Each structure stands twice: as C-alpha cells, then as structure tokens.
Image: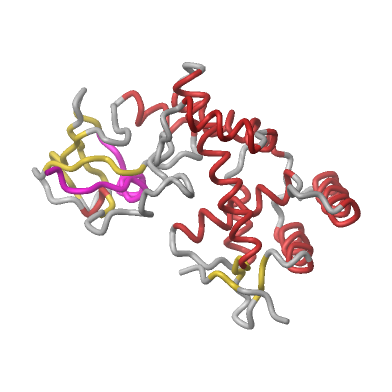
C-alpha cells in the first residue's frame, strides 16, 4: 500500500553518525525519531510552510542553515543518503519529479519537532531571559530532549502561545500559517505602516541587527525610502531608521497595520 503524501507547495564522521542513529531507530523501534531524523523533518516541515517542495539540492541548502552543533553532514550525497533512509522508514516520498514530500507519518513527525522547537525558543527567551538572537540555536540543543509531559507544562507556563518568538505558528495551537493579507517587506508601499508578522531565525548576526532595531513580530514599521536599482531600503521602526538590503527585507513578512 502506498504512503499518504502531504503535498509541499557531510563529512565522513557526520555520515557515520546519521547511519548509526537511523539504524538504531529501525532496530529498537523507538517512538521518537533520532535527533538526525528530527532535524530533517523540521527542515522539510519548514519548507512545507514556505510552500517549497524541495529537491535534494534544496534540502541540502536548508540543512546547511542548521547550527553546526547539530553535527549533520551537509553534502549532497550525505543528504541524498539520509533521504533514502527516511523513504524506507515511510517518512518521505520522492516523486518522479525528484522532489521530496513528507508522508502522513513524516508530516506528524515534522509537526511534533516544530512544536517542541518553537516552545523551546520561548523557554529560552521568556523564561530564561536570553537574547532573541540566541533562541534558535539554544532551542536546537533543547528540542530533542523535551518529553510530552514537559511540553504540556511548557505550554501552560508560557500561556499557550500560538506562534514562536519569530512569528512561525506553533503546530496545534490554532494560528494560521500566514494571514491572507501578508506580504514581504521588500514589497511594502512607501509611507504605509505595517506590523511585523515573521522574521528569519537562522542567522544570529542578522537577528541581532533586527532585534536591536526592534524589527520583531508585532512591531510597527514603515518604508521611508526604497532604491530598487541599488537594492537598498530605509525602514522606520519604533526605535530608529535603519538601512537594509532588499534580500533581507524579502525574508521579513508583514501585514498592514489596522
């Protein structure tokens, strides 16, 4: 029987680690996947959120954005090998178009690790008081060890958040993927006020800049100047005016202020 498919609009040492952990899963029948597999599921789930059905090369690029502390191999052959292993486990399907899609089982696993990761981000920021630019990396260290019981306690202690500190929805919390009227900041109309909906979380240096300028979810911003041929715009925030490239602005999702 074919798997249900959810449509989606390394060094030698790292490869060895992936092989060992995946073999351990298959041999022991663990209820929870290995950290390696969870990282792959998280990347595929995030790509699904962004309406991307990745090729192996695109998945490799996503894996490369994970913190080096995760110890994953990020060569195309390494990622291709792990994809084949996940296919055997019934977590992904690779179509005739060479694109990777989560199966129903894989999608559930992706939701699970995304939920734990985003709750861990709130744990780091709200309960432990760490800076926002540290949250993503620290959450990767914590996410794999969060049990179902701890997850429930975290949700309660945090007040049942619907989104991560970066604006991505927490699976099962009821928030939509994105409000219908959202656009990226590089498409914003000059002089119109917007509310930040989502910011990128992978680059800690970029996050330090965005947090310092108060370009964070629910803050109000407007485009003061935009020079398309130079690829630079000036953004007015509650704190100051800052310049950024269109490539950075394209990663920031906003909605019109009411």
From what the image shows, is residue 17 above or below residue 242? below
On the picture, is 16 further left or further right than 207? right
Image quarter for residue 195? Answer: top left
Front residue of 72 and 42: 42
Tell me the residue at 19%/26% (across/down).
238
From what the image shows, is residue 99 above or below residue 246? below
Residue 124 image point, x, y percent: 52, 24
On the picture, is 99 further left or further right than 253? right
Quarter of the image where the N terminus is located = bottom right
On the picture, is 91 further left or further right than 208? right
Residue 88 image point, x, y percent: 79, 68
Quarter of the image where the C terminus is located = top left
Front residue of 184 and 169: 169
Residue at the limit of the structure toward the right, as seen here = 27
On the picture, is 217 further left or further right than 28? left
Residue 111 image point, x, y percent: 56, 52
From what the image shows, is residue 238 above or below residue 76? above
From what the image shows, is residue 239 above or below residue 167? above
Tell me the residue at 20%/38% (across/down).
234
Image quarter for residue 245? Answer: top left
Give the mark count: 0
Q: What colouring style does the render use?
A: secondary structure
| Image: magenta residue range | 243-258
Tell me the residue at 29%/33% (across/down).
215
Residue 8: in magenta span: no
Tell me the residue at 61%/42% (across/down).
66
Image quarter for residue 69? Answer: top right
């Amino acid at each position: 029987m074919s798997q249900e498919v959810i449509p989606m609009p390394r060094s030698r040492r790292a490869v060895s680690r992936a092989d060992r952990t995946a073999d351990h899963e298959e041999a022991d029948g663990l209820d929870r996947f290995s950290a390696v597999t969870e990282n792959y599921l998280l990347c595929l789930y995030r790509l699904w959120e962004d309406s991307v059905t990745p090729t192996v090369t695109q998945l490799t690029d996503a894996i490369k954005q994970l913190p080096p502390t995760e110890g994953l191999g990020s060569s195309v052959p390494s990622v291709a090998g792990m994809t084949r292993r996940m296919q055997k486990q019934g977590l992904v399907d690779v179509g005739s178009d060479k694109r990777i899609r989560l199966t129903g089982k894989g999608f559930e696993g992706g939701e699970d690790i995304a939920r734990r990761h985003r709750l861990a981000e709130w744990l780091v920021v709200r309960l432990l008081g760490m800076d926002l630019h540290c949250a993503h990396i620290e959450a990767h260290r914590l996410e794999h060890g969060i049990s179902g019981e701890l997850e429930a306690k975290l949700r309660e202690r945090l007040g049942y958040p619907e989104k991560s500190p970066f604006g991505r929805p927490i699976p099962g919390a009821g928030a939509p993927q994105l409000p219908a009227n959202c656009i990226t900041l590089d498409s914003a109309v000059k002089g119109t006020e917007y509310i930040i909906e989502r910011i990128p979380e992978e680059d800690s240096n970029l996050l330090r800049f965005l947090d310092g300028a108060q370009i964070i979810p629910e803050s109000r911003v407007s485009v003061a100047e935009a020079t398309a041929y130079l690829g630079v715009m000036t953004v007015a925030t509650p704190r100051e005016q800052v310049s950024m490239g269109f490539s950075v602005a394209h990663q920031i999702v906003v909605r019109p202020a009411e």
